[in-house]
Image (cartoon, rainbow, N blue to C red):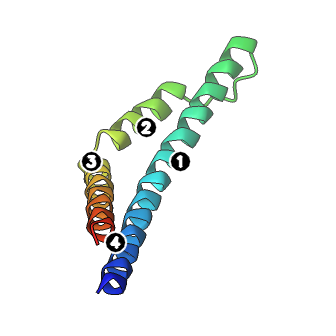
Amino acid sequence: MSSRKTQKAALITREAHLALLDLKKLVDSATEKTHQAELETEGQVIGTSRGEDALATLRGVAQAIGSPDFDAVLSQARMKIENAVASHLTVEEL
């Protein structure tokens, strides 16, 4: 019986990992774009700007991380982690 619960816990933990990878993709994209805006701003300071608009880039990041899609991915990751913790607690009770 404990083997079955352990297998189930492993699958639930895998789902949590995949949900966090989905969240990481969104955060990595936002991080990359914010870094781009940082470089654009630094270019303006030293006079080597290529004409990119840091403000537009930052607005896009703010919109992305404030979107319902981002919230849904974050909520899903949170739920999956909580499920993984609960499943492992069940295994430890054996």
Which circle marks residue 12 in the picture? Answer: 4
**30 relative to 63 in the view: left or right:** right
Q: Are marks 2 and 3 in contact (CB under 8 Å)?
A: no
Q: CA distance from mark 2 to mark 3?
A: 14 Å
Q: From the viewer's perspective, is the residue at label 2 or at label 4 nearer?
A: 4
State the residue position of label 2.
Answer: 61
Which circle marks residue 7 in the picture? Answer: none
Residue at the extreme top: 45
Q: From the viewer's perspective, is the residue at label 2 or at label 1 nearer?
A: 1
Q: CA distance from mark 1 to mark 3?
A: 15 Å
Q: CA distance from mark 2 to mark 4?
A: 31 Å
Secondary structure beneath label 4:
helix
Q: Position of residue 13 (x, y in %)?
A: 39, 68
Q: Are marks 3 and 4 in contact (CB under 8 Å)?
A: no
The quadrant in which the N terminus is found is bottom left
Secondary structure beneath label 2:
helix
State the residue position of label 3.
Answer: 71
Position above or below: 45 against 31:
above
Q: CA distance from mark 3 to mark 4?
A: 21 Å
**Category of crowding for the residue at label 1, using alpha-carbon neighbours closer than 10 angstroms: few (below 14), some (14–19), many (at least 20):** few
**Category of crowding for the residue at label 4, using alpha-carbon neighbours closer than 10 angstroms: few (below 14), some (14–19), many (at least 20):** many
Secondary structure beneath label 1:
helix
In which quarter of the view is residue 31 placed?
top right
The quadrant in which the C terminus is found is bottom left
Position above or below: 45 against 12:
above
Secondary structure beneath label 3:
helix
Q: Are marks 4 and 1 in contact (CB under 8 Å)?
A: no
Of callouts 1 and 3, the N-terminal one: 1
At 44% from the left and 51% from the top, the residue drawn is 26
State the residue position of label 1.
Answer: 28
Amino acid at circle 4: Ile
